[in-house]
């Protein structure tokens, strides 16, 4: 099997708030929403990274925290990215070096997902 592309689809209670968060703070672009009226799905893209969000019919799982998901974004100039975001979003953990060779930090998006942003330590 050859995998050509990874395209995660994550749940959200508020699609418009999620689009705004990813566009405003992380520079993603909304490629489209479906359906046209009362959309429940959107695709967001930046560089070669694409993430979709959907509003599930049953949002009870948000209260139960039944699923755990984090996203790792490999970035350039992690310290600059941290300085840009640290007063605009909720920081899950500050920038630091890890034994596994990465310098990274974490933020929490408007849905509670943790986004790890890091780069290789050279």
Image (tube, rainbow, N blue to C red):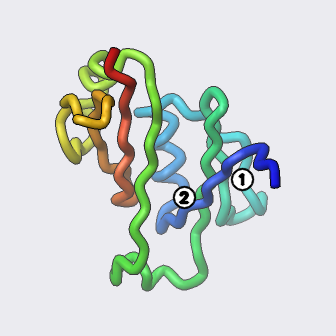
Which of the two residues, 110 or 49, is positioned nearer the viewer here? 49
Location of residue 58 by image quarter: bottom right
Label ID, residue 33: 1
Query: Looking at the image, can residue 56 be seen?
Result: yes
* Residue 38: image location, x then y, percent: 68, 65
For image coordinates 24% across by 44% down, the residue present is: 90
The image position of residue 50, as x and y in percent, is 64, 42
In this rendering, the answer to whether 14 lies above or below 61 is: above
| Horizontal arrangement in the rendering, residue 52 relative to residue 99 (left or right) | right
Image location of residue 120, percent across then percent down = 38, 24
Number of numbered discs on residues: 2
Other residues around mark 2 within 10 Å, as few (<14) / some (14–19) / many (≥20): many
Q: Does the rendering let one see residue 87?
A: no
Please tell me which residue lies in front, 117 or 113: 117
Q: Earlier in the sequence, mark 2 or mark 1?
A: 2
Which residue is drawn at the image coordinates 34% and 59% (left, top)?
112
Which numbered tag is attached to residue 15?
2
Tell me the quarter of the picture where residue 37 sits: bottom right
Quadrant for the C terminus, please. top left
Q: Is 40 situated above or below 32?
A: below
């Amino acid at each position: 099997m050859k995998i050509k592309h990874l395209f995660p689809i994550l749940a959200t209670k508020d699609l418009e708030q999620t689009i705004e968060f990813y566009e405003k703070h992380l520079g993603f672009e909304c490629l489209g929403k479906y359906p046209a009226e009362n959309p429940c799905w959107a695709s967001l893209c930046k560089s070669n990274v694409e993430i979709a969000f959907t509003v599930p019919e049953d949002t009870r799982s948000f209260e139960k925290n039944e699923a755990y998901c984090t996203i790792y974004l490999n970035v350039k100039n992690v310290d600059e990215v941290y300085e840009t975001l640290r007063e605009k979003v909720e920081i899950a953990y500050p920038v630091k070096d890890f034994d596994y060779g990465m310098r990274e930090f974490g933020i929490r998006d408007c849905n509670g997902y943790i986004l790890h942003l890091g780069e290789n330590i050279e």
